[in-house]
């Protein structure tokens, strides 16, 4: 008998349920697969100690080997949509020119198998992974890479367009900017704000060129960019904290959201960059490309909010993000103790309403949300992981998403990070996110309690709580 205090959260007809992953985090490297070296492969070869347990990008979740049986698990876990990415370094090993025939065969077979399961397929072109030879040519600081990306994108649309339902240009393009050019977390580990701004601008230009190429290949093809639209919440109502949050939002959210959806950069961002002599090299023709090629819809990744306070001192000689705003560690915040990230479900509602009110109510999907758990094997009982905490995490976010949809926000689906536990950039397999457990020793896949629950969620197109 159902509890009368329970509410039913029913989602609109046709709402999509599924998960997201990426090529570099799942495929692995197999002898004779013809894959070229990516920036991750190269970085691991010179500094393996920067990777958790020294597990590098060649040892990802063996999807290249097991994709046929993995894809069979999509239906068992209720997927009506699935997202992965093509590895540029697998398809075009030297970044430009020759195409790897093995890669064509692999991606065509994997994508066809997903379609045969009746699952909608969304494919991303870039998930932090640059062919290393292009990094040597200057990486995203160089315009040459922008045009190499455009050519790569066109190749993908032509080779796989018949199998892909929707495309993504980039996943979280701000992350390589922040981690690779400001924070020393990702290769090339530079700390240089001027270079960071150029990388961000070049990436946006590349994204807009891919949108153009996609629509030119086939007028029906749909394409988006995936952004981590983390709202920036100020510590207090003080003028200084509010200004810091506004700048944080300009740098971390609006820098890609506005040009991608509206076709132009926010004036306030341009004036801050001008004031600090940080403007990138740009041309009016490039700005026209950005203006003319907006995305058809938006993917949104949401894990945790950004809490911000005014910086201690004003900008110093060497500008960094901390010259403009500082992170705020809010006392009493709800936390995922297994990953250390704040849990703030209302963030997803705020994102939905922001898109409705300020971005023409653009169609969007939650393309990542999820809960990483360290030491998850301790929750194994009766042979499988009893991850009630993950079910609760999903439900609580869905309640806020449901509220945003009721409020008129145009969200069409929810995709969890992730399908089968996958390799994570610096954390390898430390934090598990999947609906399905991966046994690293035996390569066995075991559905978790959340995987069975997700199937019910999808079948009922909603849940009670
Ligand atoms: C997102 C990335 C994913 C994934 C996820 C989890 O930002 O798009 O690739 O890694 O974060 O984060 P982590 O793996 O660091 O725990």
Image (cartoon, helix red, strand yellow):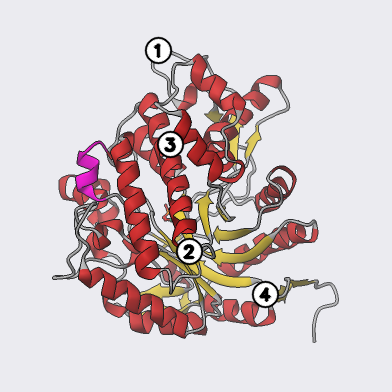
Q: Residue placed at 49% from the left, 77% from the top? A: 448
How many angstroms separate mark 4 from mark 2 (CA)? 24 Å
* Residue 2 percent location from the top left of the image: 80, 82
Residue under label 4, please give it.
14
Q: Which residues are magenta?
A: 131-138
Q: Residue placed at 41% from the left, 74% from the top? A: 437
How many angstroms separate mark 1 from mark 4 (CA)? 54 Å
How many angstroms separate mark 1 from mark 2 (CA)? 49 Å
Q: Nearer the viewer, mark 3 or mark 1?
A: 3
Residue under label 2, please give it.
218
Residue under label 3, please give it.
200
Check the picture and name the quadrant holding the C terminus: bottom right
Q: Quadrant location of ligand 1? A: bottom left
Residue 311 visible in the displayed image? no
Residue 409 visible in the displayed image? yes
Location of residue 343 with respect to 450 vertically, above or below: above
How many angstroms separate mark 3 from mark 1 (CA)? 22 Å
Q: Residues within 10 Å of mark 2 (few under 14, many from 20)?
A: few
Q: Earlier in the sequence, mark 2 or mark 3?
A: 3
The residue lying toward the viewer, choosing from 388 and 274, is 274
The residue lying toward the viewer, choosing from 274 and 442, is 274
Residue under label 1, please give it.
317
- Mark 1 secondary-structure assignment: loop
Q: Residues within 10 Å of mark 1 (few under 14, many from 20)?
A: few
């Amino acid at each position: 008998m159902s509890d009368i205090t329970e509410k039913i959260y029913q989602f609109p007809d046709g709402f999509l349920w599924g998960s997201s992953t990426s090529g570099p985090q799942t495929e692995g490297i197999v002898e004779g697969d013809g894959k070229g070296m990516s920036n991750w492969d190269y970085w691991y070869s010179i500094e393996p100690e920067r990777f958790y347990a020294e597990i590098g990008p060649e040892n990802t979740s063996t999807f290249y080997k097991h994709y046929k049986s993995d894809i069979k698990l999509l239906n068992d876990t209720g997927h009506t949509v699935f997202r992965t990415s093509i590895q540029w370094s697998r398809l075009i090993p030297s970044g430009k020119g020759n195409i790897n025939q093995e890669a064509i065969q692999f991606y065509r077979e994997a994508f066809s198998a997903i379609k045969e399961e009746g699952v909608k397929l969304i494919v991303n072109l870039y998930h932090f992974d640059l062919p290393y030879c292009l990094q040597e040519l200057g990486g995203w600081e160089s315009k040459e890479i922008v045009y190499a990306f455009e050519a790569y994108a066109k190749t993908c649309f032509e080779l796989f367009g018949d199998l892909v339902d929707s495309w993504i240009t980039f996943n979280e393009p701000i992350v390589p900017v922040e981690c690779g050019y400001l924070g020393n977390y990702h290769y090339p580990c530079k700390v240089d704000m001027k270079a960071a701004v150029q990388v961000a601008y070049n990436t946006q230009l590349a994204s807009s060129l891919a949108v153009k190429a996609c629509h030119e290949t086939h007028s029906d093809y749909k394409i988006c960019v995936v952004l981590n639209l983390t709202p920036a919440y100020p510590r207090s109502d003080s003028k200084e904290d509010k200004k810091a949050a506004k700048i944080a939002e300009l740098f971390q959210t609006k820098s890609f959201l506005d040009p991608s959806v509206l076709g132009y950069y926010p004036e306030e961002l341009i004036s801050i960059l001008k004031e600090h002599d940080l403007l990138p090299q740009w041309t009016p023709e490039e700005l026209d490309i950005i203006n003319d090629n907006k995305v058809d819809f938006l993917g949104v990744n949401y894990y945790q909010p950004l809490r911000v306070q005014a910086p201690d001192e004003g900008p110093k000689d060497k500008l960094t993000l901390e010259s403009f705003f500082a992170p705020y560690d809010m006392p009493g915040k709800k936390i995922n103790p297994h990953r250390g990230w704040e849990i703030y479900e209302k963030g997803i509602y705020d994102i939905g309403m922001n898109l409705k009110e300020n971005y023409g109510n653009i169609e969007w999907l939650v393309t990542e949300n999820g809960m990483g758990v360290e030491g998850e094997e301790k929750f194994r009982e009766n042979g499988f992981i009893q991850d009630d905490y993950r079910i609760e995490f999903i439900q609580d976010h869905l309640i806020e998403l449901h509220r945003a949809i009721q409020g008129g926000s145009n969200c069409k689906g929810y995709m969890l990070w992730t399908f089968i536990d996958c390799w994570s950039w610096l954390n390898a397999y430390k934090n598990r996110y999947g609906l399905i457990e991966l046994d690293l020793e035996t390569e066995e896949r075991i559905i978790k309690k959340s995987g069975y629950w997700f199937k019910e969620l999808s079948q009922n197109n909603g849940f009670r709580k």
